[in-house]
Structures are given as C-alpha cells and as structure tokens.
Image (cartoon, helix red, strand yellow):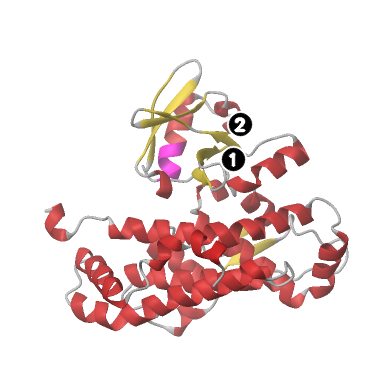
Amino acid sequence: MDKRFLQINSDLIAYQNAAHAKGFLLQCYQMQGLSNAEEAAYTNCTRFVYSLEHGDLYLNQAFQSPLAIQPALAFYGLSHYIKACLLTVDADYPATVQVLAHGLSARKRKKQNYSFLQDEVRTQRYGLFTHFSNKMFHVEHLEGTKLKMNALLKQVPELSSIFSFQSGKAPFEKVQQKDENYAIPIQLLDDYQMTEHRFSEFLEAKTMGRVNVIEADKHLIYLKPLSLSLSPPFRFHFFTNEWVFSKSKESEAFYPELLIYYSLLYNLSMIARYETEWWYDLLKHAPGKEYSLIKYFTEVSIQKIPLLIAQFLHTQKNKPSNNESQ
C-alpha cells in the first residue's frame, strides 16, 4: 500500500484488529441495549474489519490511478467504509436485500450540451444511501429528493477557493473560536437574508437543536454546536485545518459530508462507466469550469473520506456506555 495513503488513513488502521474491533462493536451494541450484544459483536467482527480493509484497497487504488477511473474506485471504497460504519449502529445489517442497492438513481442524460453542474440524482425509498443516512445520521424522509451537483459541490470546503476564483463569491465563512463557543461574521445574515432572531430559529430547527445561537454583537454571531464534526453547516477544511460555516441556507448545507461525497461520487462513477464519450471529452479537452471542480473534488475525496469515516467511528467509540450514562 502506498506510504502516502497510509498517512491519510492511519486513523482507520487501529480498527482493523479483530480483538479491538470485537471490543469496539461490543461497546456499541451494549450502549444500544442489545440483549445479544456479545454474540452480535462476535458475528460482525470479521465483516467489520474486512469492510474497512476493502475500502482501504479501493481508496489506495484510486490514489494511484488516473482520473478516468478514480470516481468509480473512490465510490466503491466509500461504500465499503459505510458498510463497516453501519455495523456499529445496525447489528443486523444487511437485514434485507433492499438495503444493498445504491439508493440513488441518475437521470437520463442529454447527449448534447450536458452539464454536470446542472445534473442531479434522485434518492430512492430503499438502498444504501437511504439506510446509512437514517441509521448513521438520523436524516430521514429523503425519498424522491433531488440532489443537485452544483449545490453539493459548494458544500465541500476544499473547493471553496475554486468557486471563489470562478464566481468571486466564497461559499463559506471562517469560524472563530471564542472560549467554548464559535463565532461567525454578522454579515452572514445578509447571505441568509434573515434577522438575527429568524436566523436563530432557522438554525435550531434545521440542525434539530445541534447548533444554537448564543448571542450577537456588531461584528459576530456566537454559536454553540453540540459537536462540530456532527453539526453541519459547520464543516472542516482538510488542507487549511480550519472550521468553516456554509453561507447557503439550502438543504444541502445541512447534510452530513458523507452523504455529499456518496451522492457526488455515485453520479461521477456512473458517468465514468456509462457516459464515456462525454467523460473523455471532459478529461482530454478540459472544457469550461467543470473540469477543475471535478478533478479537484475527486482528489479531495480520496484523501478526506478516510478522515470522515474515522471521525464517525471515533464518535461511536467515545459515546458513554449504559453504565456511564446512568
């Protein structure tokens, strides 16, 4: 395995030990109050480890491959990682064959004047996307939702500089830490087109109480998130090591990042496999602004996905057990 990639996903390697994985799963199941926690941990241990390892192999191969096949490799790597994560919250996964489908569908593409940025995918009633959205992040009622590629790409912090260059508008504001709270510029209210009171109500409702407005002054709005890593529109910029806050008030701004990566990589992988004429025209001639966004997003996803997966697993690991919470 490439040494550079080992540095990227080193946080996941700790989980790829059978004894450690079994203890980790047992802790997760005991916290959920499963009566057969010991048996379930033993049963799922090997599948959990192998799913992470298989995800590693796909992502590592993507890391070393040309852009033409990177989206498909990254998508399947992410899918296997997610299946491992699901075992921490759903001991019976997969309970039915319905959850094995992708959970998304791509619309029919027009051969001429097709634009990836204007494209969209539609969520399905069943499948991996719907299942992990619900079980891992408690995001429900997504059936039939149209996810727009341009809106999703704008929720990837690492692409902010490209959007800023192309449009002159940055999709994010930097977050300032103030003691135990976090602050964003008061000018964000202009982007949301809301008063401070309306912004507070809107944010609390959209995040289900995970982010609350504490106070505001002439320059800053002070926020208190339940958890930065689990509280979009807070997002972490992988390369600058900074937390940022989305300027968008659309639904995509409140989706966990793994939903965003899964949706974008699903569509790109479908294009790479089934729309090869358009795909290679893009790769060989790099027309328009889409090429730079797609290329950089794919590179970012290969590096950031293991971090997001490790982040989720660490959150599961650090939850209090039943004994601690009593």
Residue 244: give x, y in percent of width and height: 52, 38
Q: Amino acid at mark 1?
A: Ser
Q: Quadrant of the N terminus?
A: bottom right
Instruction: Name the residue rendered at 47%, 25% in the picture.
Output: 196
What residue is shown with label 2?
191
Q: Secondary structure at mark 1?
A: loop
The answer to whether mark 2 and mark 1 are in CB contact below 8 A is yes
Q: Which span is picked out in magenta?
A: 203-207
Task: Tell me if residue 152 comes above or below residue 234 in the rendering.
Answer: below
Residue 14 placement, left or right of 259: left
Few, some or many residues within 10 Å of mark 1 (<14, 14–19, 20+): some
Residue 59: give x, y in percent of width and height: 56, 69
What residue is shown with label 1?
248
Q: Is 51 included in the stretch rendered in magenta?
A: no
Residue 107: give x, y in percent of width and height: 70, 69
Task: Tell me if residue 243 comes above or below residue 323 in the rendering.
Answer: above
Q: Nearer the viewer, residue 24 or 33?
A: 24
Residue 293: give x, y in percent of width and height: 72, 53
